[in-house]
Image (cartoon, helix red, strand yellow):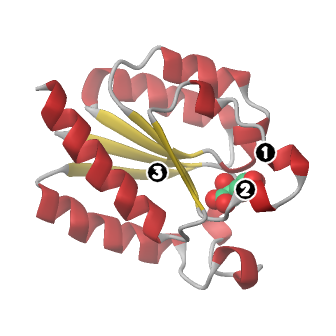
């Protein structure tokens, strides 16, 4: 029961800018919270961040071999990346899309998501709590599949 959490560009700076949109928690804080919850749920966790689209594609390919589910905050690639959508379409397990902010309340270019064409669920506007909700949902979906 391995779950991979993928984070896209600029999320390495989470908590250090635009706190009115993204809050004060850093990605390190989010990872600590996710690890605690994963242990509670009996999940093994890979928690990754990259600013590079191809790296994220490569990690999705790795998840095909190893992971039962993926939670992904593709950040700006949400709105641009057919490559990440195509990679996710090769993955057979559940996929949950996470956005810290409510993208629908923001600029119109954030209203469209390529990743949503594949995601089994989408969480937006729950702040960093969304990651925990995604983990809980993945645990459930992986159990239902087994
Ligand atoms: C984001 C929303 C995206 O539109 C933005 O480009 C991000 C973060 C979010 O978590 O709210 O980088 O995915």
- Residue receiving disc 3: 48
Q: Residue at x 35, y 18 (%)?
A: 92
Helix, strand or loop under label 3: strand
Q: Are there few (<14), some (14-19), or many (20+) residues within 10 Å of tag 1?
A: few
Picture quadrant of residue 30: bottom left
Q: Residue at x 46, y 51 (%)?
A: 48
Residue 129, above or below 48? below
Residue 124 screen position, x and y as percent: 59, 57
Which residue occupies the foreground of this view, 137 or 25? 137
Task: Confirm or deny contact between disc 1 and disc 2 (CB under 8 A).
Answer: yes
- Residue receiving disc 1: 111
Closer to the eye: label 3 or 2: 2
Residue 101 screen position, x and y as percent: 66, 65
Helix, strand or loop under label 1: loop
How far is mark 1 from mark 2, CA to CA? 6 Å
How far is mark 3 from mark 1, CA to CA? 25 Å
- Residue receiving disc 2: 103
Closer to the eye: label 3 or 1: 1
Q: Are there few (<14), some (14-19), or many (20+) residues within 10 Å of tag 3?
A: some
Circle nearer the N terminus (3, 1): 3
Picture quadrant of residue 19: bottom right
In which quadrant of this rendering is ligand 1 seen?
A: bottom right
How far is mark 3 from mark 2, CA to CA? 22 Å
Find out if the beta carbon at label 2 lies less than 8 Å from the nearest ligand 1 atom.
Answer: yes
Circle nearer the N terminus (3, 2): 3
Whether residue 6 sits left or right of residue 41 in the image: it is right
Q: Are there few (<14), some (14-19), or many (20+) residues within 10 Å of tag 2?
A: some
Q: Quadrant of the N terminus?
A: top left
Q: Quadrant of the C terminus?
A: top left
Mark seen at residue 16 = none
Helix, strand or loop under label 2: helix
């Amino acid at each position: 029961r391995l779950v991979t959490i993928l984070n896209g560009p600029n999320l390495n700076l989470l908590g250090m800018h635009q706190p009115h949109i993204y809050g004060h928690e850093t990605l390190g804080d989010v990872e600590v919270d996710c690890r605690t919850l994963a242990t509670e749920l009996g999940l093994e966790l890979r928690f990754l961040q990259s600013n590079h689209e191809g790296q994220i594609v490569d990690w999705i390919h790795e998840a095909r071999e190893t992971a039962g589910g993926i939670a992904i905050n593709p950040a700006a690639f949400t709105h641009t990346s057919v490559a990440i959508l195509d990679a996710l379409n090769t993955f057979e397990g559940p996929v949950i899309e996470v956005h810290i902010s409510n993208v629908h309340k923001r600029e119109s270019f954030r209203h469209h998501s390529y990743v949503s064409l594949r995601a089994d669920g989408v969480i937006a506007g729950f702040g960093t709590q969304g990651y925990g909700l995604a983990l809980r949902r993945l645990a459930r979906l992986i159990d239902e599949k087994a």
